[in-house]
Image (cartoon, rainbow, N blue to C red):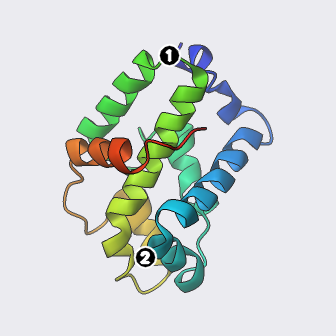
Amino acid sequence: SVLETRNLKAFYLPGLRRVRISCFQLDKLTVEYIPNVAKILDEKLGLPSVCYAIVWIQTLFAEGRALPDPAVDRLWDALFVVDSPAEARALLMRIMLALISLLGPYLATVRDAEEALKLLQTLHNVPTVDANKLFSSARQKFSAVDA
């Protein structure tokens, strides 16, 4: 299975250690690569990624409507063809960063953390996220990100 060949089973082990590490990395990388959005998430909303990214990671975006189906399909296809578990985790991280980056303008307009969570988990009030734009952003802006 993709979970075993890409060593993604660690996301489901008791204690969720790998998930917590990934969320910590996502927070740090958000500060490094998209500081304006990190400032909104942290200072304005007090919203660490553990509040919204756990479902992204554990379902690989297949649940919760955080990504439209074409983008989920493309992510899963990409996970099947990457060469290593590290590259699979890096791909997932790049996609999460790209999504946060694309949602930045919308996050700037939310009133509170509850509204931001709804946005991050369901793309509430966001026009369709284009899979090509998402993957292009992940590849161009976040290519240096490793897992």
Crowding at dot 2, Cα within 10 Å, few <14 / some 14-19 / many 20+, comes out as: some
User: At x 20% / y 55%, what residue is drawn?
Assistant: 128
| 45 shown above or below 31 | below
Residue 86: which quarter of the image? top right
User: At x 44% / y 24%, what residue is drawn?
Assistant: 79
Mark 1 sits on what residue? 83
Residue 138 image offset from top left, x and y in percent: 37, 45
User: At x 34% / y 83%, what residue is drawn?
Assistant: 109
Mark 2 sits on what residue? 115
Crowding at dot 1, Cα within 10 Å, few <14 / some 14-19 / many 20+, comes out as: few
**From the image, which quarter does the C terminus lie in?**
top right
Residue 125 image offset from top left, x and y in percent: 25, 69
Residue 142 image offset from top left, x and y in percent: 43, 48
Residue 118 image offset from top left, x and y in percent: 42, 67
Residue closest to the far front:
144
Disc 1 is placed on an element classified as: loop
* Between marks 1 and 2 in the image, the one whose residue lies nearer the viewer: 1
